[in-house]
Image (cartoon, rainbow, N blue to C red):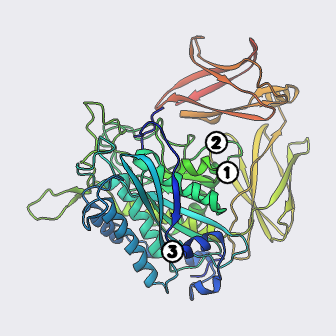
Amino acid sequence: MKKVLSILVVCSLLSGVTAQTNILSTSAVAEQVMKGNYDPSKYSSGTISTDPKEVIKLFVNEMSADSLHRSLDVLATFYTRNSASDTLSETRGIGAARRWAYREFEKISMMNNSRLIPSYLQFDHTQMCGVIRHRNIFAVLPGLDTTDKSIVIVEGHIDSRCKDVCDTTCMAQGMEDNGSGSALVLELARVMSKCGFKRTVVFLLTTGEEQGTYGAEAFAAYAQQKGIKIRAVLNNDISGGVFCGYTSSAPSCPGFGHIDSTHVRLFSAGGFNSPHKQFARFVKLEYNEEARPLMDVPTDIVIMTGEDRTGRGSDHIPFRQKNFTAIRMTAANENGNANVSDPNYKDRQHTSKDILGLNTDPDPDLDSFFVDFNYLKRNTIINATAVGMAAAGPAVPEFTATANGNGGVLISITGQRNFKQYRIALRTKTNDWDSVYTMTDRLQDTLVFSSNGNRYFSVASVDANGIESLFSKEILVNVTTATRELENQKKSIYIAANQPNPSDEQTMITIFSERDLSDKNSYLSFTDLSGREVYFMPVKLHASANEVLYNHGFQASGIFICTLVVEGKKVDAVRLVFN
């Protein structure tokens, strides 16, 4: 990844960024399907069960570590996949790599009644290492119901790099970054094409990520220009490595040699009422409820506070910038922080050492691997479960949440009222839902709480097959039973409890204001318990919930005081705990 510098089921930047131009899909059919202009009966998937549990079993049983290994073996043969590398050779460079990926999509389509539609997304960019014309590779699995016309995208970048982002002569196999994510996307296409989903699924391999997420920017701009409705984007960048390097971009692994093959991180923008965080929570819920019980080795999904690691970025960000819901999934451990300009840099990321593994015995085959194929398989299953359910689920409901003054909150479904079941998600102090309730045969329910505090609610519809929709926007309700919350009700401006709390590296601070104070001199002052100021952050306060992300540093510890000051007056203060 780049380094940022400034159902219905039937079964590393350059300066001077410029916009992509001449964006086009080489397949008119793929474009029309993504726009929802097609006859879904032409893409029937056969006899796969409508039961989502059977589909999840298919994902768990069919995703193959050996298949992922084979894809990585081929990706390594192209020597470099730098976005500016050779496009004419049949064996070397980005051109050979993208043609191979396109042919893989074609093979998958042939095995599934030509249901998968391969295409390139061609675009021009004037500042990608002197090369103007570039191509993403993608394949479209048509949905079986065009009523909604929204699509779900799962993606990873296929390009690689060495120290110099425009060096096309160095060996850049890029096995972890991001051969692993590319192999994952191809494996998803191979298995998920056996099924049909209510909505269209797009399997996308981008180029230009290492130069500045240009391929993702092109696809996001293309979707916006063509009126393609994107329901959600799940970006996979660095998906299969388990070894911690000497360095890593925080928040990441604890130190050199640490191994983690049982956790994965989800990065997304925002906090309260963020569709990106809501999608991350949906991914975790679907995996935990549907796939995890079937796994020999379960994975713990960690929902991170920030949109990406400190000072880093990836392909989900351009989609979010175009107001599409998008998140990033990445391995728990990374081998490097990409600071290749440091003369003491020893790690593999963004170097010629980002290879598949080593040969430690006399035979010619690799026997010690930097990519853990079983870990990569498990991460592929997480993707399949989330993408499949997001592509299959019903419409998102509308609702209200109202405090009754006695510790209770009345949840009322006001839109999409035709479902037998709804799910109510409750969140308090963390990035995760505390719990998810199921409401059956009714449109209202009252949840009663014995403790005070802010509570965030969202809801999802559940169809006849037991599949959830994505979850709605959050509604904040202040349940008042004790001191601070009663005091907050009387205030026109106050700081809510930060999330998560305790925190590690980053925490989201929410300031509630009844009035627009954007023209006022407002700031947050962070002090230690001795009163020493450790950070100063100007803030703009609008008549709403105002969120700011405070980055205290990886593996920070201690108790700090966050004070809100408006026009020189201390308005409120809260304690922040880092551990």
Task: Please state which amino acid type lies under the numbered disc 2.
Answer: Gly
Q: Quadrant of residue 11?
A: bottom right
Q: Position of residue 397 (x, y in %)?
A: 79, 61
The tag on residue 192 is 3
Relative to 486, 11 lies left or right: left
Please give the residue where the numbered disc 1 appears in the rendered image: 275
**Type of the residue with mark 3:** Met
| Secondary structure state at the residue bearing disc 3 | helix
Camera-side residue: 332 or 191? 191
Near mark 3 (Cα within 10 A), the count class, few <14, some 14-19 or many ≥20, is many
- CA–CA distance in space, label 2 to label 1: 8 Å
Q: Does the residue at mark 2 contact the one at mark 1 (Cβ under 8 Å)?
A: yes
One can see residue 141 in this view? no
For image coordinates 52% across by 53% down, the residue present is: 21
| Above-or-below relation of 233 to 420 | above
Q: CA distance from mark 3 to mark 1?
A: 25 Å
Relative side of 147 to 445, left or right = left
**Residue that appears at 51% across and 74% down:** 192
In this view, the residue in front, 473 or 449, is 473
Q: Which mark is residue 270?
A: 2
| Cα distance between the residues tagged 3 and 2 | 30 Å
